[in-house]
Amino acid sequence: MARIPGDAAMKVIRGGTLVESNWHGPADLLINDGTVVAVLAPGADVDPAAEVVDATGKLVMPGGVDPHCHVGFTSGEFTSLDSYRECTTAAVFGGTTTIVDFAIPRPGQSPLDAAEQQRLKATDGLCDSALHACVVDWDDTTADQLATMAQDGIRTVKMFTTYAGETMANEHTILKTMQTTRDLGGMVIIHCESDAIVTDSQTTAAATEGIDAAHMSMTRPEIAETAAVAAILAIAESQDAPVYFVHQSTAAAVELVADARTRGLVAFTESVAHHLILDDSAYGGENPERFVCCPPLRSADAVEELGQHLFTGHITTIGSDHCCYDTAQKEVHSHDVRHMPNGLPGVETRLPVIFSRYVRDSNLTASRFVELTSTNPAKTNGLFPRKGTLMPGADADIALWDPDVEWTVDVDALHMATDYTPYQGMTLRGKPVTVLVGGTVVVQDAELVDGTPRGRHLRAAPLDFEGGRRTSM
């Protein structure tokens, strides 16, 4: 689908510091017809008809790519509250210009049907989106469905090792899906928690301290995650198949994946913002139900250890795991987390909370921030170099950041379709102040200046593998 005609006149972004994943420095950026045309020396001559976007004092970054969003997601009796328009509006206010959503089939629905239904929603978005498919049970039609989806550019396939009876896949299904996606130039992505350990922990909690939201951290222990990661790595290694682990919440889990990479396996770690920022003390405060997510928030020490792997390079990407439930939905079963909707709203806050905590407060480089939140998510989803960079030929999806502005997170000033944010009252430094999508300014000075739906379903390119071993990144 082409960009809307006339919405992306020639522009030059002047006076800022351009930040790529592998370098940064003063530069001007010339864009035309929705695409980056050239990176220029500061003040270089350009067509006088070009519109000037003043980036003085700003960091000019590729728009964020959020590899982990659930839009209008139904799980059990609950459906998250946002549409594509609402989710992508919140995304662009937070500096994210591409989301990757999940097509998770409902009981009785095929993976292909779920994907076809979800991708039709892309055109309602203010920015582009891609899709992860999902397989729950393997049958004699699954391979053909995966091939059809790969032809349409849906090459990543999610599976769960927990949630028995709903989305959990058995090891046979996981192995067969790994084989097939490997041969189609794709990759399996895995939610890893041992269902047996989780079920036992929940039973024990219900009989002792309690199974309510305040005891969430007891019901899904760290060992459930590491046990499942080890099992999945063994299957992936047996097939020489690439694998991507979503929302890893402990240093031990991250290190298992890093060790597998040293053995030659193509294996990636995603962490998410709330596991890098929040800790399990939230379950002891007011509204503990608002913080129920899977895996749960970990101890402050675990958060500190996990965050260190942003610096070691062991974490590949940072997502949001955005699930836009509200307090009322969270309260229905807050007495029993086994029946609660899991997940936190975060598509709008992902980039600002990570930038403030790790770039401003902990000296993570701005280039590494871009790598984690834009470039690597684009690469692992077959969207690079169209997304995740500002080099010539890339889509002109751009966020201009004021690195010094100090502000306080307040749900009333956010744009997600919920009544709370887990970061309420947190003081942050740094914020995207101007955001362009396809060369058009959509957000400026905290105002939506162009709300035209211009989203496209992005077709992922085949991932760059030889056998199972990646040739780059």
Image (spheres, rainbow, N blue to C red):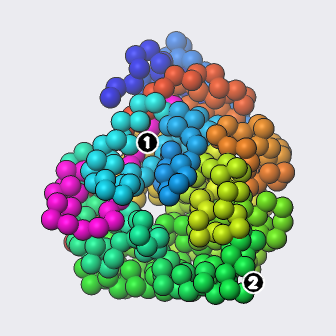
Residue at coordinates 59% horizontally, 59% vertically from top-left?
A: 341
Q: CA separation, marks 1 and 2? A: 43 Å
- Nearer to the camera, 43 or 343: 343
Where does residue 330 sit, x and y in percent of width and height?
67, 56
Residue at coordinates 65% horizontally, 41% vertically from top-left?
A: 416
Please give the label number shown on residue 129.
1
Residue at coordinates 76% horizontally, 64% vertically from top-left?
A: 288
- Nearer to the camera, 13 or 409: 409
Along the horizontal axis of the image, is 134 left or right of 424? left
Q: Which residues are magenta?
A: 126-149
Q: Amino acid at mark 2?
A: Glu
Residue behind mark 2: 209
Q: Amino acid at mark 1?
A: Ser
SS at circle 1: strand
Q: Residues within 10 Å of mark 1 (few under 14, many from 20)?
A: many
Is the residue under label 2 in contact with that under label 1 (CB below 8 Å)?
Answer: no
- Mark before the other along the chain sequence, 1 or 2: 1
Q: Residues within 10 Å of mark 2 (few under 14, many from 20)?
A: few
State yes or no: residue 321 in magenta.
Answer: no
Nearer to us: label 1 or label 2: 2
Query: Is 355 drawn above or below residue 218 in the view shown?
Result: above
Where does residue 421 sit, x and y in percent of width and height?
73, 50
Query: Is 235 drawn above or below residue 103 in the view shown?
Result: below
Residue at coordinates 52% horizontally, 22% vertically from top-left?
A: 452
Corner quadrant of residue 222? bottom right
Where does residue 23 sit, x and y in percent of width and height?
55, 53
